[in-house]
Image: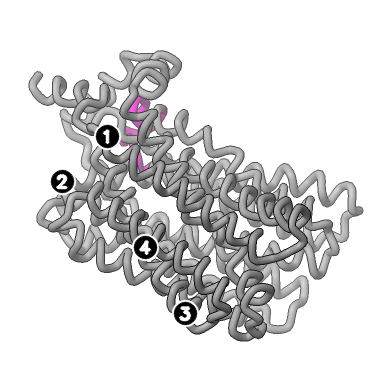
Amino acid sequence: MNADARTTGGLAAALRLAAFPFAYGIAGALAGGTLNRILVAELGLPLTVVGLLFALPMLEAPLRVWFGYRSDSHPLFGKRREPYIVAGAIVAAAGLAATVALMVSGASRTLLVAGLFVTFVVYGFGRNLGHNVFQALVADRFEGAARSRALTLYEVATMLGLVAGAGGLGQLLKDYAPGKLVAATAAAVTALVVLTLVAVIGQEKGTGATERAAAISREKAFVEALKEFLLGDPQVRRFFLLIVCTFVGTLAQDVLLEPYGALVLGMSVADTTRLTAWWGLGVLAAMLLSGGWLLRVVNPLALLRVGLVATVAVFAGVIVAGAAGDPGAFRVLVALMGLGTGLAGAGMLGGIAQFATSVRAGLLMGVWGTASLAGKAAGSLLGGAVVDAVRIATGAAFPAYATVFALEAVLLGAAFALSLRLRVADSRAGREDAAARRD
């Protein structure tokens, strides 16, 4: 990886960068796990309200496009990426700290909910800003196949941060008390800011090429750039739809595997609880294999197609296992589903890397980030809605869950078809970058 890094520092600098996604994972564990549980179980907020709070960062995802444009075109202190990433981490940390301060303040229910809407918006603003510009920094730091592998391995670092954060916060909050929550949050947000500083400071070197890229980006106002390089580019529109279809197709079942195992296959609580772990291990193994080796030798879009086909085959197997009442086969298929999802995800990240350019990396990363979060949100909503609708219509669990799995397979087939029509080199941003390099 270090041989392909654009800036000096080699492997040590590349490994240091991993501290940011690791910290990003810790923050995600605090927000999505610990605070989620306490808001519902200890503070008694309705699930609908809590669900809306945690949807706010995803609803802010379109801001990533503007964040990316600003980072591309308006350097701060002579740097296009580092100041924005640090600012994002600080804002996200402030949002989390303010959230917990409200939770332990004893405020009335109305004031608590109103305040939480504000703090979650602040948290989402910082999280989207920091993560989007970090991906642009990775695109700047690496090129060729190394960029694809780097984006994939840094996603693995995020997953490891989630696991470490969940474990550490679980230990700190073994016996819940408001004071312990404050201490655990202080530790998490401090880790977020400190690890971000460790990761990104000194990673950017101001060069003439960087200044020229920023100047070219500034030549077009945000709305003009949006029209030309995003809305007006069929390649970008096609890849956006591919990402949405892939995320919906691989994640709509995210909250359905355990109920399917219980209601259709009669599995115990202990057995269904392990399903998510098996799925996660499959994803992690595939991402590590792809980032460490496969993306060196396989075209990213080809890897994406392998993952899509494998996942479609697994969905078919899951339906058959449910019809046959075979929980043993279902367990194996869940692990294989994770492998297919991981391969598709790594291939998709590789495609994202191919689209990135020196002039528009931030803008394009914002588009792909928006697509992925839109796909995650749609997948979560679609899975539950389809199951409920079909169960009401049929009065049975198996056809309801089988319908979701079949629908996911159709969406993954659509993503496969879109991938066959992609021509990354024909994107307008790619042609702009090639012209800038010639000049």
**Secondary structure under the numbered disc 2 in the rendered image:** loop
Type of amino acid at the residue the image marks with label 4: Gly
Q: Earlier in the sequence, mark 4 or mark 1?
A: 4
In the rendering, which numbered label is found on residue 340? 4
**Secondary structure under the numbered disc 4 in the rendered image:** helix
Closer to the camera: disc 2 or disc 1?
1
Q: Is residue 51 visible?
A: yes
Q: CA distance from mark 1 to mark 3?
A: 36 Å
Using residue 12 as the reference point, say whether residue 200 is left or right of it: right
401 to 277, vertically: above or below = above
Q: Earlier in the sequence, mark 2 or mark 4?
A: 2
Using residue 322 as the reference point, say whether residue 56 is left or right of it: right
Type of amino acid at the residue the image marks with label 1: Leu
Span highlighted in magenta in the image: 70-83
Q: How many residues crowd mark 4 within 10 Å: few (<14), some (14–19), many (20+)?
A: many
Q: CA distance from mark 4 to mark 1?
A: 21 Å
- Residue 299 placement (x, y as % from top left): 18, 50
Are the two marked residues, 2 and 3, in contact with CB atoms closer than 8 angstroms?
no
Q: How many residues crowd mark 2 within 10 Å: few (<14), some (14–19), many (20+)?
A: some
- Residue 136 placement (x, y as % from top left): 33, 41
Q: Which residue is mark 2?
A: 144
In the rendering, which numbered label is found on residue 329? 3
